[in-house]
Amino acid sequence: MKIKNGNKRKIINFIRMNKNLWILLIVIISQVFTCKCTFAQTAVDEIHTFSSIDTLLLNPSVGFYKWNGQEQAPYKSLDSYERYNWRVFEKSEGVYDFSILQAAADRAYHNPNGRGKFSFAIRCLVQGTDKAYPDYLDSKINSWYSNKKICTVPDWNNAYFLERLDSLVAALGRTFNNDNRIGNVEIRSYGNWGEWHLGNFEPPISPLTPITNASIEHMIDAYTTAFPDKQLIMMCANPFGIKYAMSKTNLKFPIGWRADNWGNRGMQGIAQSESWDYFKDRWKTAPVIVEGYGTGGRGMDYSYCLPQVEQFHISAIGNGNYGVWSTMTSAQRDSVLMGVKQTGYHYTIRSCSMPKTSVAGTTIEIKTKWSNTGNAPTYQNWTVVYRLLDAKNGKVKGQTTSQLNLKTLLPTIDSSNNLDNPIIVADSFSLPTNLKSGIYRLELIILDPSKYDSPLQLYNKDRNDNGGYDLGTIKLVSSN
């Protein structure tokens, strides 16, 4: 196409008059083609979806725990639990022997199913046991012998009794507060079996003064002082006691609660108790632990097993005290297992969105979709980590922490329609600048900051050998 001479002169004059404008335009265009952006996803995101599984996983603080040395159902567990009488540890005043607890904690650590944790409780009164507290207290406290329950009831308000109980709890705290092998510590200082009640004793329950609110507070305070770094569990039978325990808000871990009548219609009464409002939502921040109603299945109504797990958001159930497995019917076994299967947290990653390609030294965005199809959250600290691995040799080339806090990921299943409502988490990952061009794998792994527990298992298929989950591959171009 020919341009007339007159028009040529107009174009040349325009360029001369707007010289600076043209220079600026050329600079902008060159920057567009040479810019190394700090946040750049250089290709359309690729969305990966993941398959889930429907079986109870062997994770910490969920499902079955070994109960007082028993595992009735033939199912594996990580954690274990036992309770003891005070007199076992203190034969004479101020002389303590915790070797039994040490041995139990060591067994949990060396559990062939995986490294577990040991939880325990100390009791002052047990029916059928002549005396649960040390003999040396007899000369300084009043007591009452129950012919019906065949046990000695101490004076719960006696100053010396409380002082010696404080000393025991403090010694336990000095020994086990910072021990990673220890899971939950139960507050069982009062009542028959340490359950915070004196039910079915002959009238009068005791000629001694009933336990006072001040003594209840004293017992609970002893545990919160001795175990500031442990998950404490409070029995729920005493209205004032459970209310006071739930009011302790200045703790590292909120106090959870426990009931020893799972699978019994009597447990339904908890939701009608005068103190229920004080702990009905505690499952959102602290565990609910239970065991069956009685040896041999006495008092068990197996139709309550699953509904009570769902109603009370139970996290863990003792593998014993709900019947003798070998003599239970298949329907009874199924009821127990359906309840156990629904306990605790069931975290699932549904999908991941990430770029197909990017440039080293830039920041990519990762979007993940998460569900909790279980009954409660986790109550311990976990770190959700993204790791970038060389696809050829599996070496970690970079990592970042997700903003996802699993402790706040409550169940996502809507109970009214049984539909799942996953949450979406958007994270950014700053890629190292020294990465070479090539193919890299993005892995998600959930780690225990204390390095005691193995990486957390998700309810997803294809867990890799690292204990994590592959989210997909990304092609990186070197920034050099």
Image: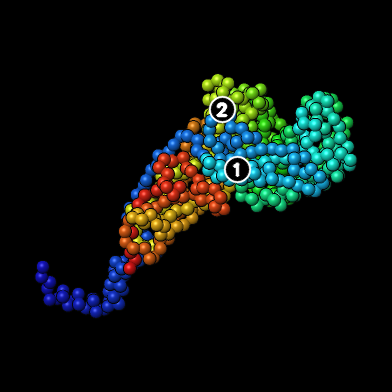
Q: Residue 337 carries which label?
A: none
Q: Which of marks 1 and 2 is nearer the N terminus?
A: 1
Can residue 286 be seen here? The reply is no
Q: Residue at x 20, y 74 (%)?
A: 11
Q: In which quarter of the image is residue 283?
A: top right
Position of 110 with respect to 88 (left or right) is left
Q: Which residue is drawn at 73% across and 46% down?
A: 97
* Residue named by callout 1: 107
Q: Residue at x 46, y 50 (%)?
A: 445
Image coordinates of residue 349 in percent, x first then y, are 44, 44
Image coordinates of residue 297 in percent, x first then y, are 63, 23
Image coordinates of residue 219 in percent, x first then y, are 77, 43
Pointer 1 local density, CA inside 10 Å: few below 14, some 14–19, many at least 20: some
Can residue 297 be seen here? The reply is yes
Position of 391 with respect to 383 (left or right) is left
Give the amino acid at mark 2: Val
Indicate the quadrant containing the N terminus: top left, top right, bottom left or bottom right.
bottom left
Give the amino acid at mark 1: Arg
Pointer 2 local density, CA inside 10 Å: few below 14, some 14–19, many at least 20: many
Position of 384 with respect to 137 (left or right) is left
How far apart, in angstroms, are the residues tagged by discs 1 and 2? 26 Å
Image coordinates of residue 249 in percent, x first then y, are 69, 48
Q: Which mark is residue 336?
A: 2
SS category of the residue bearing label 2: helix
